[in-house]
Amino acid sequence: MSDTTSTGTGQAPESGATLVADPPAEKKAAIVGRSPGQLAWMRLKRDRVGVFSLGIVLLFFIVAIAAPLVELIYGYGPDALNSNLLNDEGRPLGVLGGITFSSDGPSHHIHILGVEPQVGRDMFMQLVYGARTSLFISISATLISLAIGVVIGIVAAYMGGWIDTFLNWFTDYMLAFPFLIFAFAAIPIVNGWLQDEKHEVSEWNRIWTIIVIFSAFGWMGTARLVRGQVLSLREREYVEAARAAGAGVGHILFRQLLPNLWAPILVTFSLSVPATVTGEAALSFLGIGVVEPTPDWGRMINNSVLWYREEPMYMLIPGVSIFILVLAFNLFGDALRDALDPKSTK
């Protein structure tokens, strides 16, 4: 009796060979490759803190975008003044800044976060529209500064020579320039240029002035980061292959190098937005950012300074909102960085 085992081809295996059966066709079909983005999303989903933080961030975004719908459902506008909700000293009637869930009051409406002292505006709607203002300024300024930083960083690293030297010198100069001093000096001057015949500056002109200021001073970190990444990527084989094939500089920069920079760019974006939120709130708090009657979290805190002893809720509500949004953004940024680069924590 032969001690050899026949194979599927009808031939005997060679001496000493180990037979491995082919996996069934069903198992072959089940083996599916995953892209780097899918792998990063799987790692992010396993991070409960990151997912919870992302949910909070998305909630703020949804509320900000759907502010008119929230106003329609709530049935009360952000600019409605009601002195009947205040006592003779300008303080809200009731407890905790006039919080009430009954429509039996003078306004015949509920006020789930109370009302503002001295003016009687609903705090909840001021908070909702304030989120819209703060997030619009922060997202716009961050996107513009990221675009500037990416272009400067990728051009400086790839071109090298005097171009790299000049752009590095310019970046160092901008990093050394004091942002707050420039903002204090520039914003009033620019707003003076934008005044109309009534010596007033429109809401959108003030907002775009702040966006331009933040964009002008927010790109340096991105430029440094992108430059360092491109210095390590520009000698890779695929770049050399594209150069040998006759690809132009623009194609190499934005079609070969840029797609490999999305991970650090996304992380930078997620960490830059909360910094811009706090910076914009600081400018409004100091009186050179968003002013009345535009709803804004920083302006609300600025207005609450005179009432922090009598009505602490007036300061706590926007302050806690900024804290929660910034904390959620930072935690999500950390989780995103770990998901895109799992070796960064090792």
Image (cartoon, rainbow, N blue to C red):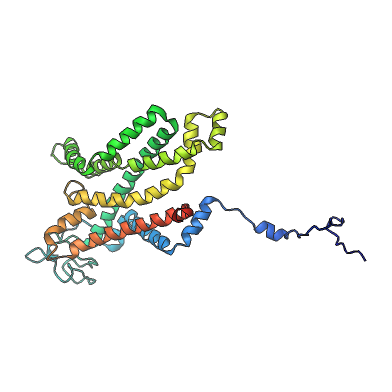
Asked whether residue 263 is in view, the answer is yes
Quick check: 210 above or below 252?
Answer: below
Q: Position of residue 76 (x, y in %)?
A: 24, 61
Q: Name the residue rendered at 29%, 49% in the picture.
A: 276
Residue 150 at what x, y percent from top left?
A: 40, 39
Counting every numbered tag in the picture gives 0
* Identity of the residue furthest to the right in this view: 1
Say whether residue 344 is left or right of residue 288.
Answer: right
From the viewer's perspective, tell me whether residue 37 is left or right of residue 291.
right
- Determine if residue 76 is in view: no
Q: Position of residue 340 (x, y in %)?
A: 47, 52
Q: Residue at x 55, y 51 (%)?
A: 35
Image quadrant where residue 54 sits:
bottom left
Say above or below: 213 vs 248: below
Residue at horizontal 29 percent and vertical 53 percent from the top: 132
Quadrant where the N terminus lies?
A: bottom right
**Image position, residue 44 (x, y; %):** 46, 58
Q: Residue furthest left?
A: 88
Q: Residue at x 32, y 36 (%)?
A: 171
Snapshot quadrant of residue 209: top left
Of all residues, the one furthest to the front in this rendering is 16
